[in-house]
Amino acid sequence: MPTVKSLTGKRNQARHVVATALLVLAETAALSGQTTLRDAAAAQGLHIGAAASADEYGPPDLLMNPSYAGALSTQYSELEPANAMKWDVTQPTQTTYNFQPGDELVTFAEANNMRVRGHNLCWYQQFPAWLAPYAASATPAEMSTLLQNHINAEVTHFKGAVFAWDVVNEAFNDPSGSAVPGLRDSIWYDQPGIGQTGTGYIEQAFQWAHAADPNALLFYNDYNIEGPGSKFTAVYNMVQDFVQRGVPINGVGFEMHITTSGYPSAAGLAQNMQQLAALGIQVHITEMDVRLPVGSNGLASAADLATQAQIYQSIMTVCLQQPNCTAFQMWGVSYGDSWIPSFFPGYGAALPLDFNYNPTPAFNALLAAMRTPVPALTASGVVNSASYQAGSVAPGEIVAIFGTGVGPDKPAAATLTNGLVSSTAASTQVLFGEYPAPILYAGSGQVNVVVPFEVTPGQDVNLTINNNGQSSPPVSIPVAQAVPGIFIIGGTGSPQQAAVLNQDLSVNGPGNPAAAGSVIVVYATGGGSLSAPVTDGELPTTLINVANTTLTVGGQPATIDFAGLAPGFAGVLQINATLPNGLAAGSAVPIVLSISGADSSSQSATIAIQ
Ligand code: XIL
């Protein structure tokens, strides 16, 4: 007797061959030649960058160092001047501007097909020598004119060369206690300030930058806002207010100067990104480094480097998963040009390239994060494995989930653990809410699972796929009481011959029609609630019924003899029914299964009647 598995297997195989062929093409394209961060990021559609210097504070000019220049242009598709576009460099006296070091970085970037991120126009420090004394005796009106002129001059100069600006940098205080932090004292805010209250000076700076270059993306940039907390809330409130009132803001920069004991959780970082995404706001990781304790040679322990690598991998993974995370920058190219050793004595080794521009474990971890495809799926790719209809799922239903990177490249079949179908296949896991689903098949483009019995009809459930340590963003799916689908034999054409056995247990089909009044066995899935509890992954050995089942053939009701779980299979329903007497013959007579008020009519299944 043909098993239900072999009947359904053929259909899955056909689908799978097409999906696999497409994926092989996609993966070949994506994986070839990815030995640089830049190439790996490009394959993911991400810009990856580093803070860069020329000779803004005097010789030597770092861009003249072939190792530095080579690493910068080979590994990164984007650069951000570490200092060359700050006030102390760009406006050395009140009446003169110096854009030469910035221009040199722009020229280098253009020659190497890189983008330039501008940093920054308004900050509380790194001023030229004349500015603080000037501010000490200036009026707010004079400060306003000064800031407006500076922003206008700099943004105008770099118009078309700088794609995004950190307009205002680090304007919020660090949290103390649980209160939402206020604005940091500065010559622009309140000492003497430019004559605006609250976040008004920030808003004004964005307006001036937008007026000078309406095409540049405008960012607010800060640290300690990577994970949820009162400082993020303060920034979020400002951004939300700006968005609601039409102030031109496009993004928030998360600096990400972190340590092995102080860094955002993947969930927390994702949450902050999602909250900003809901406002239509992009996120750039702007200044990532993970500083480690170092010896006098500037090097860190292997254990710390391994921890650091995991942190880099996890932050990169979140960025890849969140569509609004559109750039990822390190704060420096190598250990040798990192700001960490001079600002955090005793620390260093914070970047993915060491003193000799050789890859560190963090480099390899970033590469690994970008090379592993992040599982991706959509609600419309979650279908009843018999009817191939998307929509709702039901407890105990076999669903096929189509996506990319959802399972192993080498397909894995179901395995049993303690007599239950296992919820892990290769390194794939499928979660409905918190409940892992038994896996019947897992390939890179398709995973078939049995929906856990714990899902609640009438509610939505979040479906997540983990593969190779990468998680898909959750997809919300409605849960229904029942979603009956009849398994089909053969291709997707029409009519759709149902997987039905005749009374002699031969397979029904146009060449082997069933007699009116005889018994047939119909295989289906999506029956929902059961007469007795069944454990996820259980292969039932007793007869367990589904509720309220009817079967019509040629529009006439058949008599249900048994409707329940197919013994020995997970998620498969078996309906034994006696066909009505006097049923008209035909090679494609419609057969419709109805359970708990839901029916299979949308799939047009048929059987052959003699
Ligand atoms: C740092 C530079 O790397 C140093 O060279 C400079 O002496 C001080 O500033 N947050 C920022 C960056 O937004 O501008 C800072 O860059 C690092 C912290």
Image: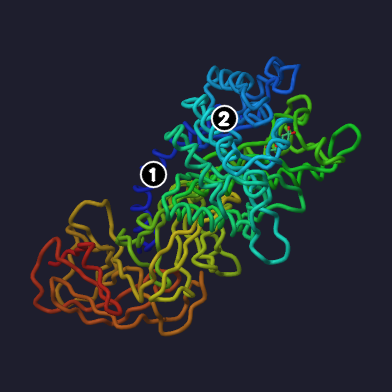
| Ligand 1 placement by image quarter | top right
Mark 1 or mark 2: whose residue is earlier in sequence: 1
Q: CA distance from mark 1 to mark 2?
A: 34 Å
Residue type at tag 2 = Glu
Q: Judge whether 267 appears above or below 328 on screen.
A: below
Which of the two residues, 469 or 514, is positioned nearer the viewer here? Answer: 469
Residue drawn at (65%, 46%), measured in percent from left and top? Answer: 192
Can residue 554 be seen by looking at this rendering? yes
Residue drawn at (34%, 47%), measured in percent from left and top? Answer: 14
In percent of width and height, residue 577 lies at: 25, 78
Residue drawn at (13%, 71%), measured in percent from left and top? Answer: 554
Image disc number at residue 78: 2
Image disc number at residue 19: 1
In percent of width and height, residue 297 lies at: 89, 32
- In the drawing, does residue 502 fall left or right of residue 245? left
Work out which quarter of the rendered image holds the C terminus and state it: bottom left
Residue type at tag 1 = Ala
Which of the two residues, 534 or 30, is positioned nearer the viewer here? Answer: 30
